[in-house]
Amino acid sequence: MKESDAQSISLLGATGSIGESTLAVLELHPEKFSIFALGANTNVKALFDLCQKHHPRFAVMADVDAATQLQNLLSHANSKTEVLAGSGALDQVASDADVDIVVAAIVGAAGLSSTMAAAKAGKKILLANKEAIVIAGNYLLEAVHQNNAKLIPLDSEHNAIFQCHPLAQSKVNIGESHSSVKKVLLTASGGPFLRRELNSFQNISVKEACAHPRWEMGRKISVDSATMMNKGLEFIEACYLFDLKPEQIQVVIHPQSIVHSMVEYIDGSILAQLGSTDMRIPIAHALGFPERIDSGAQALDIFDIAKFDFIKPCTKRFPALRLAQQAASEKHVLPTILNAANEVCVNAFLNERLSFTQISSTVEKVMHDLQGENVNSLADIMELDAQTRVATTAYLT
Ligand code: NAD
Ligand code: MG
């Protein structure tokens, strides 16, 4: 039984960058939100500290050994938080009858199962985990629609599109086409290598790739931003969330990262959402929707902005963007291969087993090798994801 009128939240990916920003917004509104569960993978110390601070009913660690360690620490501290272990437990706290809102902030395809569980249980889902929608878009949206769930994007660009899209807002259940939308202008900062000499790309270090000029994020999405695979994944994400054809999305490099995306209508109007580069803004928007609540972020001073640049991206510099746009032309098979191969390659790059340029070249090879596969169910997607990881790993050795 719920003890108050506050909305009850399961935050999955609590120890990450989005998790931290979400908790910062929640702390500003203790009367509006209560934390039901916090979930993470292996970082015992970080989840222990969060449990001591936020006192969730449940703490879930996907890794079973990590869960045992957390249990020991919490028992010694006389904590009332109950520890659950394994990915099934993430699904459980995403679908529990006492939960109102699920923040899907796990990185990678590992977040799909709990996001699907939340959709099937009819929850309000705040979606940061773009990989889930990239690989299983139709299945996830179908589960959202069939179970009267609500899905609000947290990705800053998609949240901006949602904010500039009254028709999508009136449904909240997004994923429907609207003939009045001509196109979406999906903005990108261009990452740290927008102007770096192309012939030095093979020497790019992990440190350089993770040093994003505008956003502070987890390591995987930071590398994805450097290759622009992140924008590629977001391109596919936007196709699903707003039911757009690939030719209706124009990627626009906007190095200032003040305009977070735009929607162009058939009457010639273009609506844009502006704000400082702080994920607490889209998170507060999605938490409060349709109301507005304080995010704690610094307001943008419009007089501080000298100018806006808008540049067409170069796919020679950023081949990952070309690969993702190619994948977006079909549902599920190529996006699943692209995503899984990229996850393996980014991990190998972070472990210094692959060069920066080999990330995209390896993803391209794997897409070529596996492109004829068939997908007719969610189980097929998971099987293709696993098969792709094996095929990609074979290129690394
Ligand atoms: P991060 O690496 O900082 O955090 C990832 C979180 O996921 C951690 O809490 C980790 O414990 C958890 N996790 C990882 N693997 C897991 C598994 N197998 N099972 C359960 N939990 C697992 O990543 P992040 O930057 O917070 O990004 C999270 C997601 O949000 C990604 O999909 C990313 O693309 C998306 N996103 C992030 C930002 C940002 O500003 N950081 C912006 C837009 C979208
Ligand atoms: Mg984004």
Image (cartoon, rainbow, N blue to C red):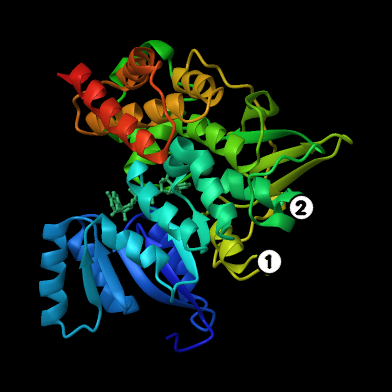
* Residue 107 relative to residue 146: left or right: left
Q: Is residue 240 above or below residue 46?
A: above
- Name the residue located 63 percent from the left edge and 54 percent from the top edge: 173
Residue underneath mark 1:
290
Q: Which quadrant of the view contains residue 148? A: bottom right
What is the x, y in percent for residue 80?
24, 84
Tag 1 and tag 2, C-beta contact below 8 Å: no
* Residue 2 relative to residue 84: left or right: right
Residue farthest to the top, as pictured: 199
Question: Is disc 2 surrounded by few (<14), some (14 to 19) or many (20+) residues within 10 Å?
Answer: few
User: Which element carries disc 1, helix, strand or loop?
Assistant: loop
Q: Give the residue type at disc 2.
A: Pro
What is the x, y in percent for residue 65?
11, 59
Q: Give the residue type at disc 1.
A: Pro
Q: Is residue 155 above or below residue 265?
A: below
Residue 135 or 156: which is nearer the viewer? 135
Residue farthest to the right, as pictured: 267
Residue 177 or 395: which is nearer the viewer? 177
What is the x, y in percent for residue 307?
70, 37
Q: Which quadrant of the view contains residue 368? A: top left
Find the distance from the CA under tag 1 to the CA under tag 2: 11 Å
- Name the residue located 45 percent from the left edge and 85 percent from the top edge: 2
Confirm whether residue 155 shows in the render. Answer: no
Q: How many marks?
A: 2
Residue underneath mark 2:
166
